[in-house]
DNA sequence: TTAGATGAGATTTTT
DNA sequence: TCTCATCTAA
């Protein structure tokens, strides 16, 4: 096979196939290239057959890219190859094997919000008030335990607080409930295969024989379960190749263990290690700045990346007062780059730490008519209307799924409220029946009239489609169902923008089923649901259209852009991560910073605001104060920027008018509901509501000529009259 | 008993 | 912006 396009180091890494291989691949060093060449090499040289290769990646996007490139190299399709994310490969494995754990193959995959719904039900059942623990906290902690393979029994040993004890009680019931619902969560997807392998060595041996060569991308981000999975599968043949960069490990909070890559040589003592240090992406200014920060970490392998692209421009540092000014600064710099360097919108990416930080940017971009696309945030498949449609499908496929049942039983509203569902739930426990099976017979529960009729009708409807599963294909069934349930009609009747959006989204989900069926004509609804559960927004990112991309630093991993804006750098960390201690948090933040900088090919702008600091961050300082200082001055240049204007934003959705005026008053202590106030612009009005705290106090005011519109004023100029 | 309105409060990163 | 608890009308 022709390996001329590789440098010597890359070539050696590709050709080494007789022992475990560890490749340290620094940012932009051609990691994907090595992996794809290696897969092609294995096949072309006849070392293994395509179907004997297992290649795991971190995201669907990365898997798609890998498939595409391997296909191009082999001039041939890659359908036989097992290239996918850990989660999707495990989901497929479980389809065949989960019966060994007492689930059926139509099991549901619960996402975060499903998990939280289930936890809320459990908490209500065992009388744990939401004030003692938040359902979200419970979910995070359970997920953390699972990612470290800590079962409730072992978790009990390390209990310190009453809260922990309560969480573990919920953890036990939660696991049982999942099983009753024939459902698994994301962590189970990884943990269950391990459990099956441990219980049944014959099954393990089957997969060891099936997958003769294992390649793992982004190995630094594997957690304990993923590590053990790979280790077990490779134990026999020891044909394994892992690629990663310890400096880009940014998922510690999710259980990823950087020790997995650092200790690979211990786990596979006969392994051979390669280090790729030629960078083909960024300029040296960017690379040196990024490395000068991450070099302060102690848990890392020393490397010295050098760019083949020359020195490049200095990094720009911009200080502003607040997030609005910051957004303006981004636009200013962006327009200058377009003018001077003849760039187009899709040369730019704006990165931030948290999704919420995108709002101010969005406002400014819209006002300046600059096209942008936000990746992440509320994802398509997490929208209410989409989850509702999927909820119906999930229930039909898996009648045990009570979370989907509760979600759909009263949508569109059919007169079945909380009280009625509670009665059914109690009855189902009394009779030791499925919740779904109780609906058919409302009489013993003393549910009569409208509610009783609705229950029977709902039961009949779901049963009907459950039987149709074998007769109709996924598209036909989904369309018939949405029609019969009247979801589209429900949204069409409403006459507001939001519901128009929802209408469109329902159509879009139907289309996506069609598209899925085109791709995989033999597939079932269960297959569709599986794919959808494991999909994220970044998977849909593409460069065909001309827009600025905005996303979190985490989402940006693996991508590259000519110009990167890194905003909100004053923002510190939350010192509340359960997993990490201070040193680990600091080191992971440095790596996050390193990842962000090395996304850029030519130019980086660092932005921070002096008057903004999120609560909780004070104890840590923040990236700006710590990490920008770690960059030598000769790599940076201060760019000054001044502009502060009064803004007026009309929210077209609600008709509300938002006024933002820079810091005039900071507290509303003197005001109360019912007070008459005078506003600098809108005139006289009456206070209807006060809320928020600190700088974010808001006041709702009804003005004389304000019709019935809701008016919200932030940082308002109000005078009591 | 349900549906809708209203006010109060919260907000990391993701497979 | 979003979610949740509480109140009110039907």
Image (tube, coloured by chain):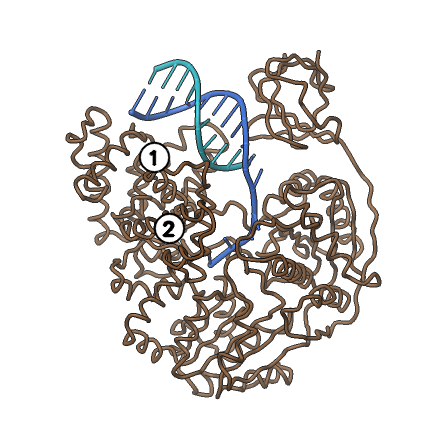
Chain colours: A brown, B blue, C cyan
Q: Quadrant of residue A130?
A: top left
- In the picture, measured across the screen, residue A319 lies left or right of residue A715, that is right
Does the image show residue A186? no
Which callout, 2 or 1, points at the residue further toward the start of the chain? 2
In the rendered image, which residue does mark 2 sit on? Answer: A171
Viewed as shown, does residue A28 lie left or right of A81?
A: right
SS class, disc 2: helix
Residue A245 image label: none
The percent position of residue A283, horizontal first and vertical second, equals 74, 67
Cα distance, mark 2 to mark 1?
A: 29 Å
Mark in the foreground, 2 or 1? 2
Q: Which residue is mark 1?
A: A411
Instruction: Report the label total.
Output: 2
A411 versus A538 height, above or below: above
Question: Is the C terminus of chain A in the top left, top right, bottom left or bottom right quadrant?
Answer: top right
Say whether marks 2 and 1 touch (CB < 8 Å). no
Which chain's residue wears label 1? A
Is disc 1 placed on a helix, strand or loop?
A: loop
Residue A635 shown left or right of residue A660 in the figure = right
Q: Position of residue A155 (x, y in %)?
A: 41, 56
Q: Chain of mark 2?
A: A
């Amino acid at each position: 096979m022709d390996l001329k396009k590789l440098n010597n180091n890359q070539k050696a890494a590709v050709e080494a196939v007789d022992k475990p291989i560890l490749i340290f691949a620094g940012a932009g060093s051609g990691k994907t290239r090595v992996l794809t060449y290696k897969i092609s090499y294995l096949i072309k040289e006849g070392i293994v057959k395509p179907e004997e290769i297992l290649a795991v990646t971190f995201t669907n996007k990365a898997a798609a890219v890998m498939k595409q490139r391997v296909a191009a190299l082999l001039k041939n399709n890659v359908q036989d190859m097992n290239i996918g994310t850990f989660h999707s490969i495990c989901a497929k494995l479980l389809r065949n094997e989960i019966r060994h754990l007492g689930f059926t193959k139509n099991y549901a995959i619960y996402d975060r919000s499903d998990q939280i719904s289930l936890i809320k039900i459990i908490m209500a059942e065992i009388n744990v008030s939401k004030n003692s623990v938040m359902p979200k906290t419970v979910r995070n902690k359970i997920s953390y335990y699972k990612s470290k393979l800590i079962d409730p029994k072992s978790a009990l040993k390390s209990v310190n607080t009453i809260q922990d004890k309560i969480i573990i009680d919920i953890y036990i019931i939660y696991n049982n409930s999942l099983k009753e619902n024939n459902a698994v969560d994301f962590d189970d997807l990884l943990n269950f295969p391990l459990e099956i392998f441990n219980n049944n060595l014959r099954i393990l041996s089957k997969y060891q024989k099936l997958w003769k060569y294992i390649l793992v991308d982004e190995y630094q981000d594997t957690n304990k379960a993923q590590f053990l999975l790979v280790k077990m599968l490779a134990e026999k043949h020891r044909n394994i190749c892992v690629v990663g960069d310890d400096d880009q490990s940014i998922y510690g909070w999710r259980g990823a263990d950087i020790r997995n890559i650092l200790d690979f040589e211990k786990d596979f003592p006969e392994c051979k290690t390669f280090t790729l240090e030629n960078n083909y992406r960024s300029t040296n200014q960017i690379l040196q700045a990024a490395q000068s920060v991450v070099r302060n970490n102690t848990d890392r392998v020393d490397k010295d990346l050098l760019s083949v692209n020359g020195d490049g421009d200095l990094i720009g540092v911009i200080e502003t007062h607040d997030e609005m000014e910051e957004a303006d600064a981004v636009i200013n710099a962006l327009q200058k780059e377009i003018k001077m360097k003849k760039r187009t919108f899709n040369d730019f990416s704006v990165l931030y730490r948290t999704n919420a930080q995108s709002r101010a940017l969005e406002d400014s971009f819209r006002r300046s008519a600059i096209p942008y696309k936000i990746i992440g945030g509320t994802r398509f498949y997490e929208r209410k209307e989409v989850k509702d449609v999927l909820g119906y499908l999930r229930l039909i496929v898996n009648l045990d799924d009570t979370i989907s049942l509760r979600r759909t039983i009263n949508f569109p509203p059919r007169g079945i409220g909380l009280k009625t569902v509670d009665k059914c739930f109690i009855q189902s426990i009394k009779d030791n029946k499925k919740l779904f099976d109780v609906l058919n017979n409302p009489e013993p529960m003393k549910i009569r009239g409208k509610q009783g009729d609705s229950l029977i009708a709902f039961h009949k409807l779901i049963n009907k489609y459950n039987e149709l599963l074998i007769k109709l294909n996924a598209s036909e069934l989904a369309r018939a169902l949405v029609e019969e349930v009247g979801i589209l009609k429900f949204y069409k009747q409403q006459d507001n923008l939001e519901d128009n959006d929802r209408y469109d989204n329902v159509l879009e989900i139907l289309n996506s089923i069609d598209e899925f069926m085109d791709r995989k004509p033999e597939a079932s609804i269960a297959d569709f649901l599986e794919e959808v559960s494991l999909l994220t927004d970044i998977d849909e990112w593409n460069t065909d259209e001309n827009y600025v991309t905005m996303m979190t630093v985490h989402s940006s991993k693996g991508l590259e852009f000519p110009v990167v804006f890194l905003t909100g750098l004053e923002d510190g960390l939350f010192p509340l991560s359960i997993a990490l201690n201070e040193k680990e948090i600091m080191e992971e933040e440095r790596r996050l910073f390193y990842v962000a900088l090395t996304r850029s090919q030519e130019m980086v702008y660092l932005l921070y605001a002096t008057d903004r600091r999120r609560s909780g961050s004070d104890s840590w300082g923040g990236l700006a104060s710590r990490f920008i200082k770690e960059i030598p001055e000769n790599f940076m240049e201060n760019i000054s920027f001044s502009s502060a204007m009064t803004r007026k934003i009309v929210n077209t959705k609600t008709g509300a008018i938002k006024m933002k005026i820079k810091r005039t008053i900071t507290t509303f202590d003197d005001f109360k509901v019912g007070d008459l106030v005078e506003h600098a612009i809108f005139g006289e009005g009456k206070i209807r509501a006060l809320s928020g705290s600190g700088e974010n106090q808001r006041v709702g005011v009804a003005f004389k000529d304000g019709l019935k519109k809701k008016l919200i004023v932030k940082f308002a100029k109000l005078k009591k009259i």
